[in-house]
Amino acid sequence: MIKTIRPILSVVAAAVIVSCSSPGEKTVEYPLVDLSNTVLLSIGKVEMTDSSTIVLFETLPLQGGWLQISSDSYLMADGKKYRMTGTDGIKPDERLWLTYPENKTFSLVFEPLPMRTRSFDFIESDCDDCFKLYGIDLTGKTEYSPAKGVPAALRKMPDFNRPLPDPDFTVGETAVRVHLLNYRPEMGKKIELLVNSMLGEVPSYSADIDPETGIAEFRFLQCGPASATVLYGYCGGEVWLAPGDDADIYFDMRITGWISRMDALSRAGDKGQYDEERPCFTYATGKYSDLTALCENRDRVMRYSMNPFSAEFADYDMTADEYTAHVISEYRAAADSIESDDAPAMLKELQMVNLKEEIVAAMAQADYLRLQNFMYLNDRWDLMKAKPDWIESLRPEHYARVCSLFDINDPKLLMGTEAYSFINAVTDPDIDWPSIAGLDSGLVPDLRKVSGLAGKVRNAALTEEDFSMLKSMDNACYHEAFSRMQAEAEKSLAETEGLAEVAPVPEVDNERLFDAIIAPYKGKIVLVDFWNTWCAPCRGAIEAVEPLKNTVLKSDDIVWLYIANESSPLVKYREMIPGIKGIHYRLPKDKWDYLRDKFGIDGIPSYVLVDRSGKYELRNDFRDHYRLKSELTGLLRASDAL
């Protein structure tokens, strides 16, 4: 049963080892897996005998996480089920706590698969979010066959011996069709598309997957070039989109199985008999299709990265001068390596763009990157928001040294894989990049002018002053984009008016706020869900719980209370809450922060359970959907028995 997931992308490979010690025995180590709905579990070994099939699992090192294996687990091969008969290292239906950096192992024993079996599935019971691994190979395959369904034109490698494409500064409605290759409905019903907009936001779009075709469709307004991530569970594929594109994305879901296996091999430190290149899992049409194809080989694209966001990039005790000299030295060394490489022209230009984006971001985050090094070396992650006295902040002359290396106003700096970090850096209000670099107009001054407007327009809150400023800008795309976004936001607010009520925030001091919110429901069971519209796990949890309100948890004795904050864009919030049965609050930041500190909320979703007497406690074990369901069901039964 899935309790927590984290994306891990490792690029280490090993040859599958298949051995037969006797006619009735067979062992396959680190078998190829077609599909997996989890990164928590990897298969280290499959042992087959005439009496049993033993599957050795390895877990992801994850401090504070846990997993649980259902006693109803089984294997499926050639249309037949093979039930679980035993375990070693884990008890069925009980939690196995995970630790970092140790990866734990356990074995599940099943009825024997026939020796002729070529592949099988592992199904941890038939619940929607139980572990599922499909197409576990027993033949010794070391690579995937070409994905079916990809147009022949996209299989052909583009000509990369030409310049990196220029950014498209227009506005248009972009249409995207995502074709999920090797899709199985059991793997999930929705898919996300995260779009890294040059307007400084990352809107997330969700779409249902057609169970028959495996296709999901998106439409959204786009301003300027954008990299987008097709996000399916913990796996993603990066594509590049131009405004008004009518694009088809072909996403091979076997990346889920590849990541699971590669992660296990990485932890084992087993590179095997050869180095395997990462297969191509994402193909796309559209104006920037060649850039998508180039970025699919991310290891090659990032070969000369400075890795500035790693905890070991900079020493925490560096002075401002030392840090600046270090960053520039790293930049020059990487630039020299790119220059001497015989790679195609587009790849070399992309690598240089990435490098420039990285150094600007590294300078803007100088304080944090040095603090991160200290926290890493001393295990002091409690200092995350601190600014220790020993960290000397950079001054304008330090930023000026970087500005002298290249033109930070070059529009092509929007076309690299680190563009989002670059945009955040040059729009930092504490660093006056235009004055330092002597810029009166162009990319950086424009990005700074529109910084923050994306958040306002998502609340339909742009003012006449905002539009006057936008209209005065040289690049007309900004005015057009925000005008259309404001119109869409106002239309959506009008359409959702009256569909769901947002409760007024009690006019009391923060210390009495929570008691005032729950006071009307004394004598009932109240489940308080802290969430936000941008939180994917929150949305997933709400979607899982919603059907229960009309079935096993249908009762007037349960009050469903949802608390979000103003980081949830008003338009999106008003669009979502009509589909969430309950009482809704949208708190200002200071009140949300108070409740967060009051309950020690470490992330969302978080839950507070209020009993009939009004006593309450944080219950983040309710992040386990089945724990929430069973406990609330038990409370209802107990009240019925009275």
Image (spheres, helix red, strand yellow):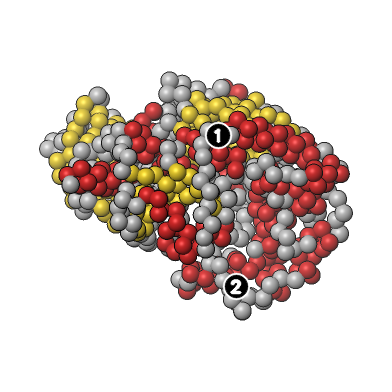
Which residue ends up furthest to the top in the rendered image? 212
Residue in the foreground of this view, choosing between 381 and 606? 606
Residue in the foreground of this view, choosing between 416 and 271? 416
Residue tagged 2: 387
Number of numbered discs overlaid on the protein picture = 2
Label 1, label 2: how far apart the Cα atoms are: 46 Å
Q: Position of residue 135 (x, y in %)?
A: 34, 32
Q: Residues within 10 Å of mark 1 (few under 14, many from 20)?
A: few
Q: Position of residue 457 (x, y in %)?
A: 68, 42
Q: Is residue 134 visible?
A: no
Secondary structure beneath label 1: loop
Place residue 355 in its image quadrant. Answer: bottom right
Residue in the foreground of this view, choosing between 89 and 268? 89
Q: What residue is drawn where x is 28% and y is 36%?
A: 552
Compared across the picture, whether 209 is left or right of 35 comes to: right
Which residue ends up furthest to the bottom in the rendered image? 390
Secondary structure beneath label 2: loop
Q: Residues within 10 Å of mark 2 (few under 14, many from 20)?
A: few
Q: Is residue 385 visible?
A: yes
Residue tagged 1: 498
Q: What residue is drawn where x is 20% and y is 43%?
A: 640
- Of the residues shown, which amino acid type is indicated by label 1? Gly
Q: What residue is drawn where x is 41% and y is 53%?
A: 518
Query: Does residue 206 lie above or below 353 as drawn?
Result: above
Query: Does residue 610 lie above or below 22 as drawn?
Result: below
